[in-house]
Image: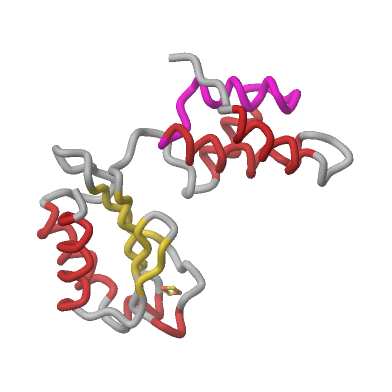
Amino acid sequence: MEFKFTEENLKRLENEIKKYPVKQPAVMAALWIAQEQNGWISGEVMQEVASILNMTNEDVLGIVTFYTMYHQKPMGKYHVQVCTNVSCMLRGGYEIFDQVKQKLNIGNMQVTGDKIFSLEEVECMGSCGTAPMIAVNEDYYENLDKGKVEQILNSLKDRN
Ligand code: FES
């Protein structure tokens, strides 16, 4: 399905492009804005970004596949990212990852049947001092234990 930025998002992208002497360095921002709008980075999104920034589709694909923050398939409304890197691991990151897997009944990079949740095991998200942590979309939840994780997931589910 064809992808076009909304008028508002196109303005945001133009502001990003203005920050650089050439268009290409705005590719990360362009993909982020596109993902916010579309939910994931489809082939059509990559084509549109490439066309606006005068890049090849292959160049854009290289960025999308290198950075894990870009989703190459549709994810849930709430994308739960559980850090299992060293600081979080030492403070129960894997237990939390297992807890979320069991609670949502999905594995890594899977989406629940109702498309409300998806799960991703991630590397350090820069919040080691408040480990263990998870992120849901762009919101961080820190200093977690199993009870807090249960509460977070329940309250997200209740919003639907
Ligand atoms: S190790 Fe988990 S946020 Fe750094």
Magenta region: 39-58
Res. 61 image quadrant: top right
Q: Position of residue 91 (x, y in %)?
A: 30, 83
Q: Position of residue 52 (x, y in %)?
A: 70, 24
Looking at the image, residue 130 lies above or below residue 20: below
Looking at the image, residue 55 lies above or below residue 129: above
Name the residue: 66% across, 40% down.
Answer: 12
Within the magenta stretch, is there residue 143?
no
Quadrant observed for ligand 1 in the rendered image: bottom left
Q: Would residue 45 appear left or right of 136 to someone viewing this image?
A: right
Name the residue: 28% across, 43% down.
Answer: 76
Res. 94 image quadrant: bottom left
Name the residue: 30% across, 56% down.
Answer: 80
Looking at the image, residue 136 lies above or below residue 95: above
Looking at the image, residue 140 lies above or below residue 57: below
Which quadrant would the N terminus be assigned to in this image? Answer: top left
Q: Residue furthest right?
A: 21
Res. 86 image quadrant: bottom left
